[in-house]
Amino acid sequence: MDRAAFHSSRHRPFNVLQNPWYGLETTPIRRIQIRVHNAWTDVFLKLESENFAGSIKARTALCLINSLEQRGELTSGTTLIESTSGNLGVALAMVARNKGYRFIAVIDPKTTDENVEKLKDMGAIIEWVSSADEYGGYLLSRINRIRELCRNNPNFVWPNQYENPANPLAHFSTTAPEIFEQLNRKVGAILVPVSTGGTLAGISRYFRHISPQTLLLAVDAHGSVVFADKASPRKLTGIGASRKSSFLTPAMYDDVFLIRDEEAFSFCHALYYATGLMVGGSSGAALAAAYQFLL
């Protein structure tokens, strides 16, 4: 092939590579230290950015779609549709593309430009929701839009990350045992950002059984109503929600940390300056909560 033709935008090499799609691989853990009261304490970061979709939502997406396939709910003509603030949508778009399904991502103005571009690159159809819900967020508006579209399109299938037990199952079966083994079965506390609650519910189910002494700490955005009753404006995405979790009960966690936007963003910057690691707002919130926990 002519070199110029190969490099032109009309001849991109999309058909010369493939992902055999064997599933998830163990993501690495990195040790950092946080200084509290002039003493340094080890904190371990689970680097979910190493997943195939760049976030922990890769686990959720794969488990959601696998569960639908196992129940025989998907066919070659199926269109998957899901509400997303970004990361789960990107992961679902990747899995759907590899498995041959169409995918519609229902997003809102808080979705980052980067994630919108990723969704488009993966072939997702974008459905925008611009009207805020009664709590000032967009989650309930996105869900209402999905229900409306599914009523009018019988070939649409909604994985429903908010209520599908495959969501917490993903973290019970993969995330939690990885953490337990990687830390030599000695885990003092785990801090988990919460939105649907699926990650914390799955991790909690595993550790309450295998290591009941491990503290399970929920991290939520200030202004979210997952644990609070009154909503307020917030900028953080990927953490917090305009509704209670369908998966969580008080027995699943030992404490809750409500983190403000500026606290989360401050710890994102601090981590980058100290280590070169670039993380999103929910990870910054987890670090802010870790600092508060250690005080």
Image (cartoon, rainbow, N blue to C red):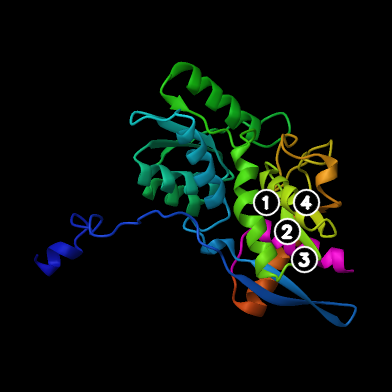
Going by the numbered disc 2, the residue's amino acid type is Ala
Mark pair 4, 2: CA separation: 27 Å
- Alpha carbon separation for disc pair 4 and 1: 32 Å
Kindly report the distance in space between the C-alpha atoms of the residues bearing marks 2 and 1.
9 Å
What is the residue that sits farthest to the left in this orientation? 2
> Which of the image's four quarters has the N terminus?
bottom left
Which residue is labeled 1 in the image? 236
Q: CA distance from mark 3 to mark 2?
A: 20 Å
Camera-side mark, 4 or 2: 4
Q: Residues within 10 Å of mark 4 (few under 14, many from 20)?
A: few
Q: Disc 1 on helix, strand or loop?
A: loop
**In the image shown, does 219 or 4 lie closer to the viewer?**
219
Q: Is residue 238 above or below residue 291?
A: above
Name which of mark 4 and mark 3 comes first in the sequence: 3
Front-lying residue, 219 or 202: 202
Q: Amino acid at mark 3?
A: Val
The residue carrying mark 2 is 285
Q: In the structure shown, which secondary structural element does the residue marked by tag 4 occupy?
A: helix
Residue 259 appears in the figure:
no
Q: From which residue to which does the magenta span run?
A: 278-295
Please identify the residue farthest to the front as the structure is shown: 210
